[in-house]
Image: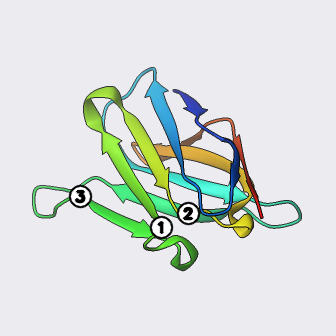
Amino acid sequence: VQLQASGGGLVQAGGSLRLSCAASGSILRVNAMGWFRQAPGKQRELVALHTTGTMLTDDSTAYADSVKGRFTISRDNAKNAVYLQMNSLKPEDTAVYYCNVDIGFRIHWGQGTQVTVSS
């Protein structure tokens, strides 16, 4: 499985960016797709997660408290893609953003994409 992320860049505080990530390869069932980020000198942290529903549950999303109300995660199941719409960006959002996918409870990571928010 390969993941290709794109959409990072340099933006001023208050601006917006949209990250995209598409998975390719042998994909049967996607349990979840998500975005993590890692700022210099810090540990990688979860930003947003989109979990596939089951016969009894709907799809669900979860966000880090620091991005709630500003970031939105979405998926296109036909394309095995996940997106992260980031609005009202802050300098503290500056980090390398990584997408990942849980396929059959195996985690696959994409290459990171740099997001830099200037003040």
- Mark nearest the camera among 3 and 2 is 2
Q: Which amino acid does label 2 sit on?
A: Val
Please report the residue visible at 40 percent of the width from the left and 35 percent of the height from the top: 81
Please report the residue visible at 49 percent of the width from the left and 37 percent of the height from the top: 20
In the drawing, what numbered circle is on residue 59? 3
Please report the residue visible at 68 percent of the width from the left and 49 percent of the height from the top: 11
- Mark nearest the camera among 1 and 2 is 1
Please report the residue visible at 17 percent of the width from the left and 61 percent of the height from the top: 58
Local SS, label 3 = loop
**Towards the viewer: 20 or 79:** 20
Image position, residue 19 (x, y; %): 53, 42
Work out how far the residue at label 3 is from the one at label 2, CA to CA, in angstroms.
Answer: 17 Å
Q: Tell me which numbered mark, 1 or 2, is placed earlier along the sequence.
A: 2
- Mark nearest the camera among 3 and 1 is 1
**Towards the viewer: 26 or 13:** 13
**Towards the viewer: 27 or 112:** 112
Work out how far the residue at label 1 is from the one at label 2, CA to CA, in angstroms.
Answer: 11 Å
Residue on which disc 1 sits: 70
Work out how far the residue at label 3 is from the one at label 1, CA to CA, in angstroms.
Answer: 20 Å
Q: Tell me which numbered mark, 3 or 1, is placed earlier along the sequence.
A: 3
Q: In this view, does 27 lie to the left or right of 10?
A: left
Labelled pair 3, 1 in contact (Cβ < 8 Å): no
Split into 4 quadrants, where in the image is the C terminus?
bottom right
Q: Which amino acid does label 3 sit on?
A: Asp
Q: Is residue 25 above or below residue 70?
A: above
Residue on which disc 2 sits: 47
Local SS, label 2 = strand
Instruction: State the scheme by which the image is colored.
Output: rainbow
Q: Which amino acid does label 1 sit on?
A: Arg
Image position, residue 115 (x, y; %): 70, 48
